[in-house]
Structure formats: structure tokens, C-alpha cells
Image (cartoon, helix red, strand yellow):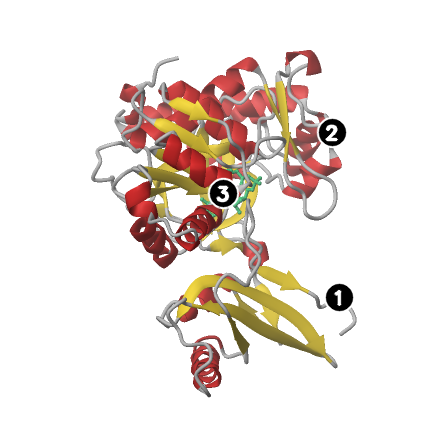
Amino acid sequence: MEERDDVLHMPHDQIEAMQLEGIKKTVVACYENVPFYKKSFDEAGFDPYSVSSLEDLSRAPFVCKQDLRDEYPFGMLAVPREDVREIHMSSGTTGVATVGAYTEHDLKFWAECFGRGIAYAGGGRSDVVQICYGYGLFTGGLGAHYGSLFSGATTIPISAGNTERQIRVLREMGSTILCCTPSYAMHIADTAIAMGLDPARDFHLRAGIHGAEAFSDNFRAELERKFDYKVLDVYGLTETMGPGVAVECMEQDGLHIAEDHFYCEIIDPATGEVLPDGEWGELVITTLDREASPVVRYRTRDITRIIPGECACGRTHRRIDRLHGRTDDMLIIRGVNVFPSQIEQVMETFDEVSSWYQIELTTKGHLDVVTLKAEVNPDFDFDSTGAIEQLQGRISAELKAALSVGVRVRLVEPMSIPRSEGKAKRVIDLRGENQ
Ligand code: DLL
């Protein structure tokens, strides 16, 4: 299957016409083949045969993660099980996992979508793509793998973990594109530096295609400085396909949605109303040609916006902004709503601390206590008397001013917060446990 460059530059009204056809087919296929959708459309009074404009989709009810969980394992399949070639599942930190199933066709367009990310990075046959997203039920490893094969690059399916081996392979194979979570990329860079290497000089990376978790612009800048490469953000989720639903191009000005396969809406998470382009809200996704696991108006819980206007790269597919977090990331601390990304933004204004942090939630009596554990940078003199206490006090005061909640700050030595090979664990909620 060749990359269809024309699709990426199609006038937007033609894309919309294609999307309308995809929506019509999908809502009917869901209604006729998935009892869940039949019931939910009927209950909402939504007639799937009546869709004649993109706006009509807003009359369809939403589907959420719990609905998919309730139908585990095969209740949401829209094709006979015999037509399913591959199955993935969400990591499911709480409760039952959700299932994503793929027909031959679904696997093909998944490869094309991630392959676009590699093409956006200017990648192709001359590249060596090292994939250290985890392989297995997680969609990261195989999604990147299919995309890399699609792009014609040489693929190294090393999976996550064994960081010293990653570093050896990066050097010896001359890998040019790195695919993994941003936090694992940073861990690879820091480990290489601790081994006496200079990742910018000793590796040959041109680009990193990093996603599966939110990362700030500062985090990205630090990665780009360490590896001397360009970081492209890739977004996706098990429930709609996996990585490749949207990918950044070299302009780094938002992630192009694969609009030939997905229709995106931004809604107000409180009212469910569709918001105009430019406004921040919750991303809702409808698949346009997914056969095995189609979704109609899936509420992702991810917070972003559609960036108005066209990208300087000339591709016409609309862009979502880099994700700020999830509606369910929101912490309610003593009645105040706080997003981890707000804490991170304050922390980033202090040069003395690195991008590694963890937020620990505990209780004292009936009150919530928030402790921010953050690593100081290696050049900070940890042993100088009073320096740590003074810096902790300054960060704490800034947090109080920005968030209106008291946050305890505990600065720790470099490399002392546990690293993860996959998604970084930023919030540790111990409030249910006895303190
Ligand atoms: O994380 C798929 C993926 C793999 C995406 C590799 C990118 C790269 P799940 O495990 O189902 O799938 O988790 C999906 O991860 O709803 C977001 O909250 C978060 N997420 C994914 N990509 C990004 C990103 C994969 N680029 C959930 N920025 C999503 C921020 C992201 N958050």
C-alpha cells in the first residue's frame, strides 16, 4: 500500500464529503451489527439512516470507556470473530480492559496512519527505526512497527526496556528515528549521559516520534537538546486504533488528524455541546472506515482543541493541539481543581529542577495533602546548607500563588525518582490508604 499523498492535500470540502460517507456507513454498520449501538441509538431517538450532514452526527449518543468495558470481550465487534486478524487491549489500570480488534483492512490503514508520522519526519527507506514502545497488547509497539514497515524503513523491534542494550543498538545500528514514550526517551538520554556518552554526538538520531503520554514544550526542548533531533508528537488510543490517529509534522504546530479515517469533535465535557474550532474541550472521535471495532462519538476524556486554519506544511488535514491532559487527570484538592500539568508549568519556571517529578496525594486527618517530589538538576549543589530548603520554599510559594492550594515540595537527587519504560507515572494517589 502506497502513501496517498493526494489525500493529505485534498481541499477540505472534499475531505468533509468523504467523512460524511464514512459516518453514514459507520453508524449504519454499528446499528445493524452491534446490539449495544442499536439499543443506545434507539434510546436516544437517533435514526442512523437519517444522517445527511456532518452536523447530524451531533444527534448521536456518546459512547464511553465503561460501555466498551461492559461489552468485554467481543460485544462491540461489528464483524464475525473469524474476520478479526489481531486484538489489542488497553492497559486498564482499573477494572476490565477494553478490546480493540482489527480486520485485514483495519491493520492496513493503521500502518498507513503511523507510516505518515515517519513520512512527516522525512523518513523512508534510508532510515533505521528503533521501536522501543512495548510490544504486546499495548498498541504502541506494533502500531509503530506496522507504520515503519509501511514507510519502507529498516525496522528494529527492540520493544521497551533494557536501556543499556537500547543504547548499544542506537550506536551500533545507527538508528535514525526513535519511537517510544517521551519519558522513556529522556531516560535513554540520561542513562547514556551517565555512561559518559553524548547522545547528540554518539547517536545518529534525526527524529523521535513520541507519544502515549502528555509532555510539555520544555520537556520536548530538553529532549531535542540532548539528542539533537526533532521530536514529533503522536496521539492515539486503543479504543479508536492505537498510535497514529494524529501526528505532528515538522512544523511542530499541532497534530494532523488522519481525517480520512477519523472524524473529531471537541465538546464541552460538562454539557456535551459541540464547541467551535479553537476552543478547548474534550476530544470525541468517530471512526470512518474501521471494520472490526468502529466507534461512534467515543469520549476520549482527552483535552485539546482544533487549531483553526491551515498548517504551513500545506497538508489540509485539520490539527489538534498538543494535549494538556485528561478530564479524569483533574485532582480535586481541598475542593480546588488542579491539573498535574499546572503544577508542571510552575515547576518549569525554576532552572534548578529537572523535568522529573511525581505528585503524591495523601491525607492527614480529613485533609488532602499534596506533595510534589521533584529532582534537582545534576549541577545543583544538593549539600550546600540551606539551599534545598530555600528552593523548596520558593517553589511552594509559587505553587500556592498559581493554584491556590498548598503543595509540599520535596526536592530529591537526580535520577532518584523511578523511571518507567512505558508511560511515566506522574500521580500517586495514596488517599485511600491509611496514613
Ligand atoms: O497510548 C496509544 C499510543 C501508543 C499513542 C504510542 C501514542 C504512541 P492507550 O494505552 O489506550 O493508547 O492510551 C490512550 O494515552 O487517551 C491519552 O490520554 C494518552 N495519550 C496518547 N497519546 C498521547 C499524546 C496509547 N501524544 C491514552 N499526548 C489517550 C498526550 C496521549 N497523551
| Image quarter in which the N terminus is found | top left
Rate crowding at label 3 as few (under 14), some (14 to 19) or many (20 or more) other CA atoms within 10 Å.
Answer: few
Tell me the distance, in whole angstroms, between the alpha carbons under discs 3 and 1.
37 Å
Q: Which residue is mark 3?
A: 164
Q: Are marks 3 and 1 in contact (CB under 8 Å)?
A: no
Tag 3: amino acid: Glu
Q: Is residue 216 above or below residue 107?
A: below
Residue 256 seen from this side: no
- Find the residue positioned furthest to the right: 434
- Find the residue positioned furthest to the bottom: 386
Q: Nearer the viewer, mark 2 or mark 3?
A: 3
Q: Nearer the viewer, residue 141 or 413?
A: 413
Helix, strand or loop at label 3? It is helix
Tag 1: amino acid: Gly
Residue at 59% x, 35% y is 138
Question: Mark 2 or mark 3: which comes first in sequence?
Answer: 2
Helix, strand or loop at label 2? It is loop
Q: Which residue is mark 1?
A: 432
Q: Is residue 134 above or below residue 123?
A: below
Question: Mark 3 or mark 1: which comes first in sequence?
Answer: 3
Q: Nearer the viewer, mark 2 or mark 1?
A: 1
Residue 128 is tagged as: none
Residue at 54% x, 38% y is 160
| Image quarter in which the C terminus is found | bottom right
Question: Mark 2 or mark 1: which comes first in sequence?
Answer: 2
